[in-house]
Amino acid sequence: MFEYIWLLLPLGLLIGWLAAKRDNVKKQKMLRYLNLRYFIEESQEVDDQLLTLPPDYDADNLNFSLMLGDVFRKRGEIDKAINLHEYLIKEAPTKALTEKVYLSLAEDYLAAGMLDRGESTLRLLLESENYKKVALLKLSKVYKQQREWLQSIAMLEQVTPLTEDLLAEMAHLYCELAEEELLLQDPPNLDRLTLWLDKALLADNDCARANLIRAYALYYYENFEASLESLMLIEGQRTELLPVITPMVYELSSRNKRPEYFYEWLERAIIVNDHIVLKAWKTHYLILNESFEAGVEYLQSVLKKESNLYGLMLLNKLQKYQQERTDAILVEKTFREMLDQYAQFRCESCGYTTKAMQWSCPSCFEWNRSIPVTDIVALKVKH
Ligand SMILES: [Zn+2]
Protein backbone atom coordinates (compact mmCIF):
# COMPACT_ATOMS: atom_id res chain seq x y z
CA MET A 1 0.00 0.00 0.00
CA PHE A 2 2.78 2.38 0.97
CA GLU A 3 4.66 1.96 -2.30
CA TYR A 4 1.51 2.23 -4.29
CA ILE A 5 0.66 5.64 -2.84
CA TRP A 6 4.11 6.96 -3.67
CA LEU A 7 3.49 6.47 -7.34
CA LEU A 8 0.28 8.42 -7.27
CA LEU A 9 1.49 11.51 -5.46
CA PRO A 10 1.65 14.81 -7.21
CA LEU A 11 4.95 16.56 -6.52
CA GLY A 12 3.52 19.29 -4.28
CA LEU A 13 2.23 16.75 -1.86
CA LEU A 14 5.46 14.85 -2.03
CA ILE A 15 7.29 17.82 -0.58
CA GLY A 16 4.63 18.10 2.12
CA TRP A 17 5.16 14.50 2.85
CA LEU A 18 8.93 14.89 3.18
CA ALA A 19 8.49 17.79 5.59
CA ALA A 20 6.39 15.62 7.80
CA LYS A 21 8.76 12.71 7.62
CA ARG A 22 10.81 13.82 10.59
CA ASP A 23 7.87 13.39 12.86
CA ASN A 24 6.58 9.88 12.78
CA VAL A 25 3.23 10.76 14.27
CA LYS A 26 2.79 13.49 11.76
CA LYS A 27 3.75 11.09 9.05
CA GLN A 28 0.91 8.79 9.95
CA LYS A 29 -1.51 11.67 9.72
CA MET A 30 -0.07 12.81 6.46
CA LEU A 31 -0.62 9.39 5.00
CA ARG A 32 -4.24 9.80 5.89
CA TYR A 33 -4.32 12.94 3.83
CA LEU A 34 -2.68 11.28 0.95
CA ASN A 35 -5.31 8.59 1.12
CA LEU A 36 -7.93 11.25 1.30
CA ARG A 37 -6.45 13.11 -1.59
CA TYR A 38 -6.13 10.00 -3.67
CA PHE A 39 -9.65 9.02 -2.85
CA ILE A 40 -11.13 12.36 -3.78
CA GLU A 41 -9.13 12.48 -6.98
CA GLU A 42 -10.63 9.19 -8.02
CA SER A 43 -14.23 9.59 -6.99
CA GLN A 44 -16.76 12.35 -6.51
CA GLU A 45 -18.25 10.96 -3.32
CA VAL A 46 -16.57 11.04 0.07
CA ASP A 47 -17.29 7.94 2.08
CA ASP A 48 -17.41 8.90 5.77
CA GLN A 49 -16.40 5.47 6.92
CA LEU A 50 -13.31 5.37 4.81
CA LEU A 51 -12.27 8.81 5.84
CA THR A 52 -12.79 8.70 9.57
CA LEU A 53 -9.92 10.70 10.93
CA PRO A 54 -7.90 9.79 13.99
CA PRO A 55 -8.88 11.33 17.35
CA ASP A 56 -5.68 13.41 17.45
CA TYR A 57 -6.59 15.03 14.17
CA ASP A 58 -5.55 18.60 14.90
CA ALA A 59 -5.91 22.12 13.58
CA ASP A 60 -2.86 22.01 11.30
CA ASN A 61 -4.18 18.99 9.55
CA LEU A 62 -7.60 20.49 9.16
CA ASN A 63 -6.12 23.62 7.64
CA PHE A 64 -4.32 21.48 5.16
CA SER A 65 -7.49 19.70 4.08
CA LEU A 66 -9.31 23.00 3.96
CA MET A 67 -6.73 24.31 1.56
CA LEU A 68 -7.01 21.18 -0.51
CA GLY A 69 -10.73 21.83 -0.86
CA ASP A 70 -10.00 25.41 -1.95
CA VAL A 71 -7.63 24.08 -4.60
CA PHE A 72 -10.39 21.83 -5.92
CA ARG A 73 -12.68 24.82 -6.21
CA LYS A 74 -10.09 26.88 -8.01
CA ARG A 75 -9.56 24.06 -10.46
CA GLY A 76 -13.28 24.04 -11.13
CA GLU A 77 -13.87 20.74 -9.34
CA ILE A 78 -16.57 22.26 -7.20
CA ASP A 79 -18.35 19.01 -6.31
CA LYS A 80 -15.19 17.72 -4.71
CA ALA A 81 -14.61 20.98 -2.87
CA ILE A 82 -18.14 20.94 -1.47
CA ASN A 83 -17.89 17.31 -0.43
CA LEU A 84 -14.63 17.89 1.36
CA HIS A 85 -15.66 21.11 3.08
CA GLU A 86 -19.04 19.76 4.17
CA TYR A 87 -17.20 16.83 5.67
CA LEU A 88 -14.70 19.08 7.45
CA ILE A 89 -17.48 21.09 9.11
CA LYS A 90 -18.29 18.01 11.16
CA GLU A 91 -14.66 17.52 12.13
CA ALA A 92 -13.58 21.06 12.98
CA PRO A 93 -12.44 21.00 16.63
CA THR A 94 -12.85 24.72 17.44
CA LYS A 95 -15.31 27.50 16.68
CA ALA A 96 -12.65 29.50 14.86
CA LEU A 97 -11.89 26.60 12.54
CA THR A 98 -15.57 25.86 11.95
CA GLU A 99 -15.99 29.46 10.81
CA LYS A 100 -13.02 29.17 8.51
CA VAL A 101 -14.54 26.09 6.88
CA TYR A 102 -17.92 27.82 6.54
CA LEU A 103 -16.23 30.59 4.61
CA SER A 104 -14.66 28.12 2.19
CA LEU A 105 -17.93 26.24 1.85
CA ALA A 106 -19.77 29.48 1.07
CA GLU A 107 -17.23 30.17 -1.67
CA ASP A 108 -17.89 26.69 -3.09
CA TYR A 109 -21.63 27.25 -3.18
CA LEU A 110 -21.24 30.64 -4.83
CA ALA A 111 -18.82 29.22 -7.40
CA ALA A 112 -21.35 26.49 -8.14
CA GLY A 113 -24.06 29.13 -8.63
CA MET A 114 -25.96 27.93 -5.54
CA LEU A 115 -26.57 31.48 -4.40
CA ASP A 116 -29.21 30.59 -1.76
CA ARG A 117 -26.91 28.17 -0.01
CA GLY A 118 -23.97 30.54 -0.31
CA GLU A 119 -26.07 33.29 1.21
CA SER A 120 -27.31 31.22 4.16
CA THR A 121 -23.80 29.92 4.85
CA LEU A 122 -22.36 33.44 4.82
CA ARG A 123 -25.12 34.59 7.16
CA LEU A 124 -23.86 32.08 9.72
CA LEU A 125 -20.67 34.15 9.87
CA LEU A 126 -22.32 37.48 10.67
CA GLU A 127 -21.80 36.90 14.39
CA SER A 128 -18.18 35.87 13.89
CA GLU A 129 -15.48 38.14 15.24
CA ASN A 130 -12.98 37.25 12.53
CA TYR A 131 -15.17 36.77 9.47
CA LYS A 132 -18.00 39.23 9.90
CA LYS A 133 -16.48 41.81 7.58
CA VAL A 134 -15.60 39.41 4.79
CA ALA A 135 -19.06 37.79 5.08
CA LEU A 136 -20.74 41.20 4.79
CA LEU A 137 -18.71 42.08 1.70
CA LYS A 138 -19.44 38.76 0.05
CA LEU A 139 -23.15 38.97 0.89
CA SER A 140 -23.26 42.47 -0.55
CA LYS A 141 -21.81 41.07 -3.76
CA VAL A 142 -24.33 38.20 -3.86
CA TYR A 143 -27.25 40.64 -3.49
CA LYS A 144 -25.73 42.91 -6.10
CA GLN A 145 -25.59 39.97 -8.53
CA GLN A 146 -29.28 39.36 -7.89
CA ARG A 147 -30.02 43.07 -8.31
CA GLU A 148 -31.30 43.31 -4.74
CA TRP A 149 -29.83 46.75 -4.27
CA LEU A 150 -31.28 47.60 -0.85
CA GLN A 151 -30.09 44.30 0.63
CA SER A 152 -26.67 44.90 -0.84
CA ILE A 153 -26.53 48.40 0.67
CA ALA A 154 -27.70 47.07 4.05
CA MET A 155 -24.69 44.73 4.11
CA LEU A 156 -22.22 47.47 3.22
CA GLU A 157 -23.63 49.78 5.88
CA GLN A 158 -22.51 47.33 8.57
CA VAL A 159 -18.89 47.22 7.38
CA THR A 160 -16.39 49.18 9.49
CA PRO A 161 -14.47 51.14 8.53
CA LEU A 162 -16.31 52.25 5.40
CA THR A 163 -13.50 52.99 2.96
CA GLU A 164 -13.76 55.40 0.04
CA ASP A 165 -14.14 52.51 -2.39
CA LEU A 166 -17.01 51.04 -0.40
CA LEU A 167 -18.74 54.42 -0.20
CA ALA A 168 -18.37 54.81 -3.99
CA GLU A 169 -19.87 51.34 -4.37
CA MET A 170 -22.76 52.27 -2.10
CA ALA A 171 -23.41 55.43 -4.15
CA HIS A 172 -23.66 53.30 -7.31
CA LEU A 173 -26.10 50.93 -5.62
CA TYR A 174 -28.33 53.90 -4.78
CA CYS A 175 -27.95 55.01 -8.41
CA GLU A 176 -29.19 51.57 -9.51
CA LEU A 177 -32.32 52.14 -7.41
CA ALA A 178 -32.71 55.60 -8.93
CA GLU A 179 -32.30 54.24 -12.47
CA GLU A 180 -34.92 51.58 -11.83
CA GLU A 181 -37.27 54.30 -10.61
CA LEU A 182 -36.54 56.41 -13.68
CA LEU A 183 -36.72 53.64 -16.28
CA LEU A 184 -39.14 51.07 -14.92
CA GLN A 185 -41.80 53.19 -13.19
CA ASP A 186 -44.23 55.05 -15.40
CA PRO A 187 -44.37 57.81 -14.42
CA PRO A 188 -41.32 57.84 -12.12
CA ASN A 189 -41.89 59.00 -8.56
CA LEU A 190 -39.73 62.10 -8.29
CA ASP A 191 -39.67 62.11 -4.47
CA ARG A 192 -38.36 58.57 -4.29
CA LEU A 193 -35.92 59.24 -7.11
CA THR A 194 -34.60 62.31 -5.29
CA LEU A 195 -34.25 60.32 -2.09
CA TRP A 196 -32.03 57.72 -3.78
CA LEU A 197 -29.92 60.34 -5.51
CA ASP A 198 -29.44 62.35 -2.30
CA LYS A 199 -28.35 59.18 -0.55
CA ALA A 200 -25.94 58.38 -3.38
CA LEU A 201 -24.32 61.81 -3.14
CA LEU A 202 -24.24 61.60 0.64
CA ALA A 203 -22.22 58.40 0.35
CA ASP A 204 -19.98 59.76 -2.40
CA ASN A 205 -20.12 63.44 -3.17
CA ASP A 206 -18.18 62.79 -6.40
CA CYS A 207 -20.74 60.40 -7.85
CA ALA A 208 -21.17 61.86 -11.35
CA ARG A 209 -23.70 59.20 -12.19
CA ALA A 210 -26.15 60.56 -9.57
CA ASN A 211 -26.01 64.03 -11.13
CA LEU A 212 -26.48 62.57 -14.60
CA ILE A 213 -29.58 60.63 -13.51
CA ARG A 214 -30.94 63.75 -11.79
CA ALA A 215 -30.38 65.75 -14.99
CA TYR A 216 -32.28 63.12 -17.00
CA ALA A 217 -35.16 63.10 -14.51
CA LEU A 218 -35.44 66.89 -14.49
CA TYR A 219 -35.34 66.85 -18.29
CA TYR A 220 -38.20 64.35 -18.23
CA TYR A 221 -40.22 66.78 -16.11
CA GLU A 222 -39.20 69.61 -18.45
CA ASN A 223 -37.36 71.52 -15.73
CA PHE A 224 -34.59 72.40 -18.17
CA GLU A 225 -32.88 75.05 -16.05
CA ALA A 226 -32.39 72.72 -13.08
CA SER A 227 -31.47 69.85 -15.40
CA LEU A 228 -28.62 71.86 -16.87
CA GLU A 229 -27.44 72.88 -13.40
CA SER A 230 -27.26 69.24 -12.34
CA LEU A 231 -25.40 68.35 -15.51
CA MET A 232 -22.86 71.12 -14.90
CA LEU A 233 -21.88 69.53 -11.58
CA ILE A 234 -20.34 66.64 -13.54
CA GLU A 235 -17.76 69.05 -14.93
CA GLY A 236 -16.25 69.36 -11.47
CA GLN A 237 -16.51 65.63 -10.77
CA ARG A 238 -15.23 63.73 -13.77
CA THR A 239 -13.91 65.63 -16.79
CA GLU A 240 -13.51 62.34 -18.73
CA LEU A 241 -17.30 62.22 -19.05
CA LEU A 242 -17.62 65.56 -20.84
CA PRO A 243 -17.89 63.98 -24.33
CA VAL A 244 -20.74 61.82 -23.02
CA ILE A 245 -22.82 64.74 -21.74
CA THR A 246 -22.17 67.10 -24.68
CA PRO A 247 -25.38 66.26 -26.66
CA MET A 248 -27.42 66.92 -23.52
CA VAL A 249 -25.69 70.24 -22.81
CA TYR A 250 -26.44 71.21 -26.42
CA GLU A 251 -30.10 70.23 -26.13
CA LEU A 252 -30.60 71.96 -22.78
CA SER A 253 -28.85 75.14 -23.90
CA SER A 254 -31.28 75.52 -26.78
CA ARG A 255 -34.25 74.51 -24.60
CA ASN A 256 -33.20 77.28 -22.21
CA LYS A 257 -33.01 79.59 -25.22
CA ARG A 258 -29.34 80.29 -24.61
CA PRO A 259 -27.53 78.57 -27.51
CA GLU A 260 -24.41 80.71 -26.89
CA TYR A 261 -24.12 79.07 -23.47
CA PHE A 262 -23.30 75.82 -25.23
CA TYR A 263 -20.36 77.33 -27.09
CA GLU A 264 -18.93 78.91 -23.92
CA TRP A 265 -19.24 75.60 -22.15
CA LEU A 266 -17.69 73.73 -25.08
CA GLU A 267 -14.65 76.03 -25.20
CA ARG A 268 -14.16 75.48 -21.48
CA ALA A 269 -14.59 71.73 -21.88
CA ILE A 270 -11.97 71.47 -24.64
CA ILE A 271 -9.39 73.08 -22.33
CA VAL A 272 -9.78 70.37 -19.69
CA ASN A 273 -10.47 67.46 -22.05
CA ASP A 274 -9.08 67.34 -25.59
CA HIS A 275 -11.34 64.51 -26.72
CA ILE A 276 -12.05 64.46 -30.48
CA VAL A 277 -15.81 64.28 -29.92
CA LEU A 278 -15.73 67.71 -28.25
CA LYS A 279 -13.80 69.06 -31.22
CA ALA A 280 -16.28 67.48 -33.62
CA TRP A 281 -19.04 69.34 -31.77
CA LYS A 282 -17.13 72.57 -32.14
CA THR A 283 -16.83 71.88 -35.88
CA HIS A 284 -20.58 71.42 -36.13
CA TYR A 285 -21.21 74.55 -34.10
CA LEU A 286 -18.95 76.65 -36.34
CA ILE A 287 -20.63 75.32 -39.49
CA LEU A 288 -24.08 76.10 -38.14
CA ASN A 289 -23.25 79.50 -36.67
CA GLU A 290 -20.38 80.89 -38.77
CA SER A 291 -19.68 79.19 -42.06
CA PHE A 292 -19.01 75.85 -43.61
CA GLU A 293 -15.38 76.81 -44.27
CA ALA A 294 -14.81 77.95 -40.67
CA GLY A 295 -15.85 74.50 -39.42
CA VAL A 296 -13.76 72.58 -41.94
CA GLU A 297 -10.74 74.81 -41.33
CA TYR A 298 -11.00 74.28 -37.59
CA LEU A 299 -11.21 70.51 -38.02
CA GLN A 300 -8.25 70.49 -40.39
CA SER A 301 -6.17 72.43 -37.85
CA VAL A 302 -7.11 69.90 -35.18
CA LEU A 303 -6.12 66.96 -37.40
CA LYS A 304 -2.83 68.59 -38.35
CA LYS A 305 -1.82 68.65 -34.71
CA GLU A 306 -2.98 65.14 -33.97
CA SER A 307 -4.02 62.43 -36.41
CA ASN A 308 -7.30 60.85 -35.50
CA LEU A 309 -9.43 58.44 -37.51
CA TYR A 310 -12.70 59.65 -36.09
CA GLY A 311 -11.81 63.23 -36.99
CA LEU A 312 -10.66 62.16 -40.44
CA MET A 313 -13.95 60.39 -41.04
CA LEU A 314 -15.84 63.53 -40.12
CA LEU A 315 -13.67 65.67 -42.40
CA ASN A 316 -14.26 63.26 -45.25
CA LYS A 317 -17.99 63.43 -44.65
CA LEU A 318 -17.96 67.21 -44.71
CA GLN A 319 -15.93 67.34 -47.89
CA LYS A 320 -18.33 64.87 -49.44
CA TYR A 321 -21.18 67.28 -48.79
CA GLN A 322 -19.14 69.95 -50.49
CA GLN A 323 -18.04 68.04 -53.54
CA GLU A 324 -20.20 64.94 -53.88
CA ARG A 325 -17.31 62.75 -54.92
CA THR A 326 -18.22 59.09 -55.21
CA ASP A 327 -14.92 57.83 -53.84
CA ALA A 328 -15.47 60.00 -50.77
CA ILE A 329 -18.76 58.24 -50.18
CA LEU A 330 -17.01 54.91 -50.44
CA VAL A 331 -14.32 55.99 -47.98
CA GLU A 332 -16.89 57.25 -45.55
CA LYS A 333 -18.90 54.06 -45.75
CA THR A 334 -15.77 52.07 -45.04
CA PHE A 335 -14.82 54.29 -42.10
CA ARG A 336 -18.29 54.08 -40.61
CA GLU A 337 -18.40 50.31 -40.83
CA MET A 338 -14.96 50.21 -39.26
CA LEU A 339 -15.95 52.55 -36.43
CA ASP A 340 -19.06 50.53 -35.72
CA GLN A 341 -16.96 47.48 -35.10
CA TYR A 342 -14.88 49.09 -32.41
CA ALA A 343 -15.53 49.96 -28.84
CA GLN A 344 -16.31 53.44 -27.71
CA PHE A 345 -15.40 52.99 -24.03
CA ARG A 346 -12.45 51.47 -22.25
CA CYS A 347 -11.86 50.48 -18.62
CA GLU A 348 -8.95 52.44 -17.16
CA SER A 349 -8.14 49.64 -14.74
CA CYS A 350 -8.10 46.52 -16.88
CA GLY A 351 -8.45 47.84 -20.45
CA TYR A 352 -11.72 46.03 -21.17
CA THR A 353 -13.55 47.76 -24.02
CA THR A 354 -17.28 48.16 -24.53
CA LYS A 355 -19.58 49.82 -27.03
CA ALA A 356 -21.77 51.38 -24.36
CA MET A 357 -20.69 53.14 -21.20
CA GLN A 358 -20.49 50.85 -18.16
CA TRP A 359 -20.51 52.24 -14.63
CA SER A 360 -19.18 48.96 -13.31
CA CYS A 361 -16.59 47.26 -15.54
CA PRO A 362 -17.96 43.88 -16.76
CA SER A 363 -14.45 42.46 -16.57
CA CYS A 364 -12.82 43.72 -13.35
CA PHE A 365 -16.05 44.97 -11.68
CA GLU A 366 -14.44 48.25 -10.63
CA TRP A 367 -16.64 51.32 -10.53
CA ASN A 368 -16.11 54.55 -12.47
CA ARG A 369 -13.37 53.23 -14.75
CA SER A 370 -15.14 53.27 -18.11
CA ILE A 371 -14.10 56.31 -20.13
CA PRO A 372 -14.70 57.29 -23.77
CA VAL A 373 -11.77 56.29 -25.98
CA THR A 374 -10.12 59.09 -27.94
CA ASP A 375 -9.72 57.06 -31.11
CA ILE A 376 -10.30 53.62 -32.53
CA VAL A 377 -8.80 51.49 -29.79
CA ALA A 378 -8.10 48.33 -31.72
CA LEU A 379 -5.96 50.09 -34.28
CA LYS A 380 -3.73 51.63 -31.63
CA VAL A 381 -2.91 48.37 -29.85
CA LYS A 382 0.59 47.22 -30.72
CA HIS A 383 0.83 43.50 -31.17
ZN1 LIG B 1 -12.05 46.82 -15.87
Image: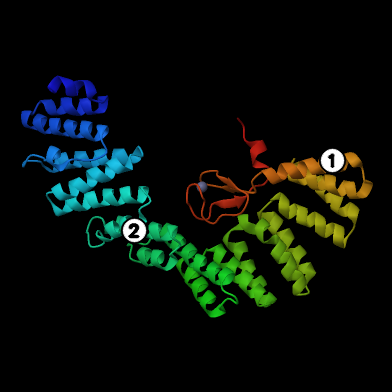
Instruction: Please identify the quadrant where the N terminus is shown.
Output: top left
Q: Earlier in the sequence, mark 2 or mark 1?
A: 2
Q: Type of residue at label 1?
A: Leu
Residue occupying the point 77% across, 70% down = 254
The residue sitting at the right extreme is: 323
Q: Type of residue at label 2?
A: Asp
Q: Quadrant of residue 231?
A: bottom right
As measured in the structure, the alpha-carbon distance from the residue carrying label 2 to the one carrying label 1 is 56 Å
- The correct choice, above or below, for 174 with respect to 379 in the image is below
Instruction: Please identify the quadrant where the C terminus is shown.
Output: top right
Q: Looking at the image, is mark 2 or mark 1 nearer the viewer?
A: 2
Q: Is residue 25 left or right of residue 79?
A: left
Q: Nearer the viewer, residue 63 or 351?
A: 63
- The correct choice, above or below, for 23 with respect to 49 in the image is above
Label 2 CB, ligand 1: below 8 Å?
no
Taking the image as drawn, is residue 28 in sight? Answer: yes
Q: Nearer the viewer, residue 272 or 18?
A: 18
Residue occupying the point 7% across, 39% down = 54
- The correct choice, above or below, for 76 with respect to 23 in the image is below
Name the disc covering residue 80, or none: none
Q: Is residue 281 left or right of residue 92?
A: right
- Assign a secondary structure to mark 2: helix
Residue 142 in percent (x, y) is at 39, 57
Residue 220 in percent (x, y) is at 66, 74
* Residue named by callout 1: 330
Residue occupying the point 80% across, 43% down = 333
- Assign a secondary structure to mark 1: helix
Residue 180 in percent (x, y) is at 53, 68
- The correct choice, above or below, for 345 with respect to 146 in the image is above
* Residue named by callout 2: 116
Colour scheme: rainbow
